[in-house]
Amino acid sequence: MRVVQDRASLAEARDALTGRVAVVMTMGALHEGHASLLAAARAAADAVICTIFVNPLQFGPNEDLDRYPRSLDADLAVCERHGVDVVFTPTEDVIYPYGQPQIRVNPGSLGETLEGASRPGFFHGVLTVVLKLLHLTRPDIAYFGEKDYQQISLVRRMVRDLDVPTEIVAAPTIREADGLALSSRNRYLSPEERAAALTLSRALFAGQEAASEGPAKAAQAAQDVIDAEPRVRPDYLVLTGTDLGPAPQRGEARLLVAARMGRTRLIDNVRVTLRSSEGLNPDEGRDPTSGWSPARS
Ligand code: AMP
């Protein structure tokens, strides 16, 4: 495994790779969620590049850039265990040699909702660094987690809209045994906050279970679980279509949540299969009023 920090070494290491090359982009503090992406990449491609870079461009002024967990030695051990060929661990100067970039990827209207509404400029920062890392690593295929559902939706659109020759693959969310989605930010949680954080996945699973009764019941079941835990302050809990537009009356949908516990903000989402149309004729198709969102933040 080669560990490279600068552009020239990365280019040289990349040129030495043959066959189909996969990339997994991370901000480090690697856990089993990241490891699952590395394993999927390893299984599908001839060579795997892992990038580790805490991207300052996607952090707002009052966010956790300075305290974001960093554990390079442990991360390299995870990469080694998963047969990664090249690890790219650039500094900020390597990624942004001219300072903060004037030109950034504009995520459009989808980038202004949900995470984009809670974290202005977030997706401009994310897509800009993803595009740069795609240029620098030149992968045939790139793996992203469904844990960040809006992110992978936007990456797919960027690749499509800007003709990036990389296949984007979504990998399922890896969870703790009790349901909590793995996240580097889980390390911040006190035991009490950890207990409260479990409300997020419990709410999503409750919504999933109620999905056979239609979208309103699914959304309400999730909301009831969130409302019962005062230590959780939700930013949003919303049922949408798989494209993050309005939820359909039946069929595939997505239930997404973001919430704060103490100083820590976590996100999670699940796939939901809506089976009933709550008395409506299923042939009527989408109901524009079903883009349900509680006005609570
Ligand atoms: P991050 O280091 O948080 O930027 O995440 C890097 C990649 O790992 C992204 O594609 C995430 O969606 C993915 N990821 C993070 N947490 C999980 C998880 N629990 N399960 C699967 N993938 C994840």
Image (tube, rainbow, N blue to C red):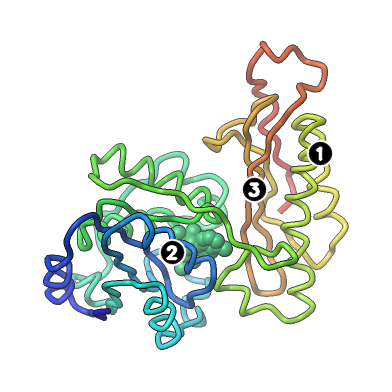
At 66% across and 44% down in the image, what residue appears?
255
Closer to the chain start, of discs 1 and 3, is 1
Give the foreground label among 3 and 2: 2
Q: What amino acid type is highlighted by mark number 2?
A: Ala
CA separation in Å, label 1 and label 2: 33 Å
Q: Going from the N terminus, do you reach mark 1 or mark 2 first?
A: 2
Q: Which residue is mark 3?
A: 270
Give the label on residue 52, or none: none
Q: Amino acid at mark 3?
A: Val
Q: Which of 53 and 3 lies nearest the eye of the viewer?
A: 3
Could you tell which of marks 3 and 2 lies nearer the N-terminus? 2
| Horizontal and vertical percent position of residue 112 | 49, 45
Element carrying mark 2: helix
Residue 294's spot in the image, x, y percent?
A: 74, 43
Tell me the quarter of the image containing the C terminus.
bottom right
Viewer-side residue, 247 vs 251: 251
Question: Which labelled disc corresponds to residue 210?
Answer: 1
Q: Which residue is mark 2?
A: 39
Badge 3: how crowded within 10 Å, few (<14), some, or many (20+)? many
**Residue located at (66% from left, 74% from top):** 263
Q: Quadrant of residue 187?
A: bottom right
- Callouts 1 and 2 close, C-beta under 8 Å: no
- Provide residue 131's location: percent of width, then percent of height: 28, 55
